[in-house]
Amino acid sequence: MLWYSIRLNEMEKQKAEKKPGCSEIIIPVRDTLYVINGKWKMPIIGSLMQGSKRFKELERSIPRITPRMLSKELRELEMNQLIVRKVYDTFPVTIEYEITEYGFSLKKVLEAMYEWGIEHRKRITGKK
């Protein structure tokens, strides 16, 4: 699955690079969106920016996420090196998820998206 995702992304980049007038700005933005895309990735990242959490703690911190979806999103975030899964040799085994330094590099992106979202909602709803 990892190889397929990476290979597919490389093929898409090559197609985009061959198109006339393809801006060099679009490719990095598309790559960013590819990594953080989806309903749940940003809430997971935001929750982990507040500190490491076990699976159930994460599940409780994100309303309406299913265990299956949380598990899928955590795997993808780990694959993209935004989070790390730590297994502790205890009984029962303790597993915690923690944001990486690389994952923290998204903080400014999150803040900018938050600010833009507030302004956008005001503009669309007409409320100030």
Image: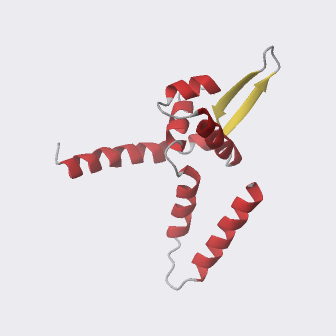
Q: Residue furthest bottom?
A: 20
Report if residue 54 is visible in the image.
Answer: no
* Image location of residue 80, percent across then percent down: 67, 49
Q: Quadrant of the N terminus?
A: bottom right
Q: Residue visible at 42% across and 42% down?
A: 111
Q: Is residue 115 shown above or below 30?
A: above
Q: Residue visible at 53% across and 63% down?
A: 30
Residue 24 lies left or right of residue 2; in this view the side is left
* Image location of residue 54, percent across then percent down: 64, 24
* Image location of residue 58, percent across then percent down: 57, 28
Report if residue 35 is visible in the image.
Answer: yes
Q: Residue visible at 64% across and 27% down?
A: 55
Q: Which of 90 and 112 is in front in this view?
A: 90
Residue 42 lies left or right of residue 122; in this view the side is right
Q: Is residue 91 shown above or below 128?
A: above
Q: Is residue 66 shown above or below 33?
A: above
Q: In which quarter of the image is residue 72?
A: top right
